[in-house]
Image (tube, rainbow, N blue to C red):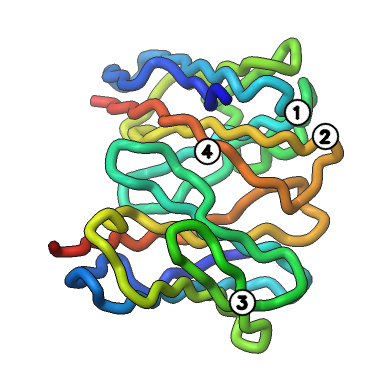
Protein backbone atom coordinates (compact mmCIF):
# COMPACT_ATOMS: atom_id res chain seq x y z
CA UNK A 1 0.00 0.00 0.00
CA UNK A 2 1.11 3.53 -0.67
CA UNK A 3 2.33 5.54 2.30
CA UNK A 4 3.86 8.94 2.86
CA UNK A 5 6.27 9.83 5.65
CA UNK A 6 7.14 13.34 6.72
CA UNK A 7 10.30 13.54 8.77
CA UNK A 8 9.51 16.39 11.11
CA UNK A 9 6.32 16.92 13.07
CA UNK A 10 7.16 20.36 14.37
CA UNK A 11 9.72 22.84 13.06
CA UNK A 12 10.53 26.20 14.62
CA UNK A 13 12.55 28.75 12.65
CA UNK A 14 13.40 32.41 12.85
CA UNK A 15 12.48 34.73 9.99
CA UNK A 16 14.96 34.64 7.10
CA UNK A 17 16.13 31.13 7.97
CA UNK A 18 16.11 28.51 5.25
CA UNK A 19 13.54 25.74 5.28
CA UNK A 20 13.60 22.14 4.15
CA UNK A 21 10.80 19.74 5.00
CA UNK A 22 11.36 16.11 4.22
CA UNK A 23 8.88 13.81 2.51
CA UNK A 24 9.33 10.20 1.46
CA UNK A 25 6.80 7.92 -0.16
CA UNK A 26 6.54 4.22 -0.73
CA UNK A 27 5.32 3.24 -4.17
CA UNK A 28 7.30 1.69 -6.97
CA UNK A 29 5.35 2.99 -9.92
CA UNK A 30 4.74 6.38 -11.47
CA UNK A 31 3.45 8.92 -8.98
CA UNK A 32 2.08 12.42 -8.85
CA UNK A 33 3.34 14.43 -5.88
CA UNK A 34 1.87 17.37 -4.05
CA UNK A 35 2.49 19.72 -1.17
CA UNK A 36 -0.58 21.24 0.46
CA UNK A 37 -0.54 23.96 3.09
CA UNK A 38 -3.03 24.92 5.77
CA UNK A 39 -2.61 28.40 7.23
CA UNK A 40 -4.16 29.03 10.67
CA UNK A 41 -7.91 29.23 10.37
CA UNK A 42 -7.91 28.47 6.65
CA UNK A 43 -8.60 25.45 4.50
CA UNK A 44 -6.04 23.20 2.86
CA UNK A 45 -4.70 24.63 -0.37
CA UNK A 46 -2.26 23.48 -3.01
CA UNK A 47 1.28 24.79 -2.67
CA UNK A 48 2.88 22.96 -5.60
CA UNK A 49 2.72 19.74 -7.57
CA UNK A 50 4.89 17.45 -9.67
CA UNK A 51 3.55 15.32 -12.51
CA UNK A 52 6.41 14.92 -14.95
CA UNK A 53 9.34 16.74 -16.54
CA UNK A 54 11.70 18.96 -14.56
CA UNK A 55 12.06 17.39 -11.11
CA UNK A 56 12.48 20.83 -9.54
CA UNK A 57 9.07 22.43 -9.28
CA UNK A 58 8.22 25.90 -8.11
CA UNK A 59 5.07 26.84 -6.28
CA UNK A 60 3.46 29.85 -4.73
CA UNK A 61 5.12 32.20 -2.24
CA UNK A 62 8.69 31.23 -3.17
CA UNK A 63 8.41 27.54 -2.29
CA UNK A 64 10.00 24.83 -4.39
CA UNK A 65 10.30 21.06 -4.17
CA UNK A 66 12.63 18.54 -5.74
CA UNK A 67 11.56 15.09 -6.83
CA UNK A 68 14.38 12.56 -6.44
CA UNK A 69 13.05 9.31 -7.85
CA UNK A 70 15.95 7.17 -6.62
CA UNK A 71 15.30 8.30 -3.06
CA UNK A 72 11.49 8.26 -3.28
CA UNK A 73 11.62 11.79 -1.93
CA UNK A 74 9.88 15.10 -2.58
CA UNK A 75 11.35 17.62 -0.15
CA UNK A 76 9.96 21.12 0.19
CA UNK A 77 12.32 24.08 0.39
CA UNK A 78 12.29 27.83 0.81
CA UNK A 79 15.47 29.90 1.03
CA UNK A 80 14.14 32.49 3.45
CA UNK A 81 10.97 31.99 5.49
CA UNK A 82 8.63 34.71 6.66
CA UNK A 83 6.37 34.89 9.69
CA UNK A 84 3.41 34.46 7.32
CA UNK A 85 4.70 30.99 6.38
CA UNK A 86 3.59 29.71 9.77
CA UNK A 87 1.26 26.86 8.84
CA UNK A 88 0.87 23.12 8.62
CA UNK A 89 2.39 21.48 5.56
CA UNK A 90 1.24 18.18 4.09
CA UNK A 91 2.98 16.06 1.51
CA UNK A 92 0.68 13.88 -0.60
CA UNK A 93 1.00 11.31 -3.35
CA UNK A 94 -1.24 9.54 -5.79
CA UNK A 95 -0.30 6.72 -8.07
CA UNK A 96 -0.62 7.15 -11.80
CA UNK A 97 -3.91 5.72 -12.91
CA UNK A 98 -5.62 6.31 -9.57
CA UNK A 99 -8.55 8.63 -9.85
CA UNK A 100 -7.20 11.55 -7.91
CA UNK A 101 -7.07 9.75 -4.56
CA UNK A 102 -4.41 11.37 -2.39
CA UNK A 103 -2.42 9.67 0.34
CA UNK A 104 -1.27 12.28 2.83
CA UNK A 105 1.65 12.36 5.20
CA UNK A 106 1.02 13.19 8.84
CA UNK A 107 1.93 16.84 8.35
CA UNK A 108 4.62 19.19 9.62
CA UNK A 109 3.76 22.21 11.70
CA UNK A 110 6.03 25.14 10.89
CA UNK A 111 6.30 27.98 13.35
CA UNK A 112 8.25 31.04 12.21
CA UNK A 113 9.32 33.44 14.91
CA UNK A 114 9.36 37.14 13.95
CA UNK B 1 -14.95 31.62 -7.61
CA UNK B 2 -16.94 30.24 -4.68
CA UNK B 3 -15.16 27.56 -2.71
CA UNK B 4 -16.26 24.22 -1.31
CA UNK B 5 -18.96 24.81 1.28
CA UNK B 6 -19.36 22.59 4.32
CA UNK B 7 -21.73 22.63 7.26
CA UNK B 8 -21.91 22.56 10.16
CA UNK B 9 -18.57 24.00 11.16
CA UNK B 10 -18.59 22.29 14.55
CA UNK B 11 -20.62 19.44 16.03
CA UNK B 12 -20.58 17.91 19.49
CA UNK B 13 -22.50 14.69 20.11
CA UNK B 14 -22.50 11.82 22.54
CA UNK B 15 -21.37 8.36 21.55
CA UNK B 16 -24.03 6.21 19.91
CA UNK B 17 -25.79 9.28 18.52
CA UNK B 18 -26.00 9.96 14.81
CA UNK B 19 -24.64 12.94 12.89
CA UNK B 20 -24.67 14.20 9.31
CA UNK B 21 -22.36 16.52 7.43
CA UNK B 22 -23.13 18.38 4.24
CA UNK B 23 -20.88 19.45 1.39
CA UNK B 24 -21.51 21.58 -1.69
CA UNK B 25 -18.58 21.39 -4.11
CA UNK B 26 -17.43 24.02 -6.54
CA UNK B 27 -19.87 24.31 -9.42
CA UNK B 28 -18.97 22.01 -12.30
CA UNK B 29 -16.63 19.80 -10.30
CA UNK B 30 -17.26 16.19 -11.18
CA UNK B 31 -15.27 14.56 -8.41
CA UNK B 32 -16.04 14.86 -4.71
CA UNK B 33 -14.06 13.44 -1.81
CA UNK B 34 -14.67 13.01 1.90
CA UNK B 35 -11.57 12.87 4.06
CA UNK B 36 -11.23 12.21 7.79
CA UNK B 37 -8.45 14.04 9.62
CA UNK B 38 -7.74 12.87 13.15
CA UNK B 39 -5.72 15.25 15.33
CA UNK B 40 -2.02 14.92 14.59
CA UNK B 41 -2.53 12.95 11.39
CA UNK B 42 -2.91 13.74 7.74
CA UNK B 43 -6.27 13.49 5.99
CA UNK B 44 -7.42 9.97 5.13
CA UNK B 45 -9.79 9.33 2.23
CA UNK B 46 -13.15 7.89 3.24
CA UNK B 47 -15.01 7.97 -0.06
CA UNK B 48 -14.66 9.37 -3.57
CA UNK B 49 -17.52 10.12 -5.95
CA UNK B 50 -17.27 10.66 -9.68
CA UNK B 51 -20.50 12.53 -10.48
CA UNK B 52 -23.03 10.50 -8.49
CA UNK B 53 -21.18 7.17 -8.60
CA UNK B 54 -18.80 5.82 -5.97
CA UNK B 55 -15.24 5.36 -7.21
CA UNK B 56 -13.49 4.36 -3.99
CA UNK B 57 -14.98 3.62 -0.59
CA UNK B 58 -12.41 1.07 0.51
CA UNK B 59 -11.61 2.90 3.76
CA UNK B 60 -15.17 3.82 4.69
CA UNK B 61 -16.35 1.96 7.83
CA UNK B 62 -19.56 0.86 6.19
CA UNK B 63 -21.10 -0.55 9.34
CA UNK B 64 -21.52 3.00 10.65
CA UNK B 65 -20.63 5.47 7.90
CA UNK B 66 -22.66 6.20 4.80
CA UNK B 67 -22.44 8.84 2.11
CA UNK B 68 -24.47 9.86 -0.87
CA UNK B 69 -24.29 12.27 -3.77
CA UNK B 70 -27.71 11.81 -5.32
CA UNK B 71 -27.71 14.36 -8.15
CA UNK B 72 -23.98 14.53 -8.69
CA UNK B 73 -23.72 17.86 -6.92
CA UNK B 74 -23.87 18.16 -3.14
CA UNK B 75 -23.18 15.31 -0.78
CA UNK B 76 -23.93 14.18 2.74
CA UNK B 77 -21.82 12.00 5.03
CA UNK B 78 -23.56 10.27 7.94
CA UNK B 79 -22.28 8.46 11.00
CA UNK B 80 -24.67 6.20 12.89
CA UNK B 81 -23.91 5.33 15.64
CA UNK B 82 -20.90 7.49 16.46
CA UNK B 83 -17.95 6.20 18.47
CA UNK B 84 -15.37 8.12 20.48
CA UNK B 85 -12.72 7.39 17.85
CA UNK B 86 -14.79 9.21 15.21
CA UNK B 87 -13.75 12.53 16.74
CA UNK B 88 -11.98 14.26 13.87
CA UNK B 89 -12.27 16.95 11.24
CA UNK B 90 -14.26 15.80 8.22
CA UNK B 91 -13.05 17.47 5.07
CA UNK B 92 -14.82 17.66 1.77
CA UNK B 93 -12.84 18.30 -1.39
CA UNK B 94 -13.70 18.56 -5.05
CA UNK B 95 -11.95 18.67 -8.38
CA UNK B 96 -12.99 19.36 -11.96
CA UNK B 97 -11.64 15.99 -13.10
CA UNK B 98 -14.28 14.93 -15.64
CA UNK B 99 -12.20 11.93 -16.74
CA UNK B 100 -11.02 10.83 -13.30
CA UNK B 101 -7.40 11.81 -13.80
CA UNK B 102 -4.83 11.39 -11.08
CA UNK B 103 -3.22 14.80 -11.42
CA UNK B 104 -6.11 17.14 -10.79
CA UNK B 105 -5.82 19.78 -8.10
CA UNK B 106 -8.16 19.31 -5.15
CA UNK B 107 -10.06 22.19 -3.59
CA UNK B 108 -10.85 21.70 0.09
CA UNK B 109 -13.61 23.03 2.28
CA UNK B 110 -13.00 24.30 5.80
CA UNK B 111 -14.18 21.05 7.33
CA UNK B 112 -16.55 19.99 10.09
CA UNK B 113 -14.94 19.43 13.47
CA UNK B 114 -16.71 16.55 15.22
CA UNK B 115 -16.32 15.84 18.92
CA UNK B 116 -17.83 12.62 20.23
CA UNK B 117 -18.18 12.59 24.04
Q: Nearer the viewer, residue B105 or B31?
A: B105
**Residue that badge 1 annotates:** B30
Discs 1, 2 touching: Cβ within 8 Å: yes
Can marks 3 and 2 be said to lie on one chain?
Answer: no
Residue B17 pos. (x, y %): 36, 14
Q: Residue A103 appears in which quarter of the rendering? A: bottom right
Q: Earlier in the sequence, mark 1 or mark 2?
A: 1
Q: CA distance from mark 4 to mark 3?
A: 29 Å
**Residue that badge 2 annotates:** B98
Q: Earlier in the sequence, mark 2 or mark 4?
A: 4
Task: Identify which residue is drawn at 26% across, 66% down.
Answer: A10
Can marks 4 and 3 be said to lie on one chain?
Answer: no
Kindly state the secondary structure of the residue where label 4 is placed.
strand
Discs 1, 3 touching: Cβ within 8 Å: no
Q: Is residue B39 above or below residue A69?
A: above
Can marks 1 and 3 be said to lie on one chain?
Answer: no
Identify the chain of the residue marked 3, using the numbered disc in the image: A
Residue B107 pos. (x, y %): 57, 37
Q: Is residue A5 left or right of residue A100?
A: left
Q: How many marks?
A: 4
Task: Identify which residue is drawn at 43% across, 59% down.
Answer: A61
**Residue that badge 3 annotates:** A56
**Residue that badge 4 annotates:** B35
- Which of labels 4 and 3 is toward the front? 3
Amino acid sequence: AQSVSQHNHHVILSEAASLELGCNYSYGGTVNLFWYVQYPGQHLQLLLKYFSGDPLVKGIKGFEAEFIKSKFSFNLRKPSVQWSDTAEYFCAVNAYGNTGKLIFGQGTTLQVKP
Amino acid sequence: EAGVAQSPRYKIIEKRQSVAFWCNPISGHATLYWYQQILGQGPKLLIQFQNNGVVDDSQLPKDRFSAERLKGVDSTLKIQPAKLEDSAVYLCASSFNPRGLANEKLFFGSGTQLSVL
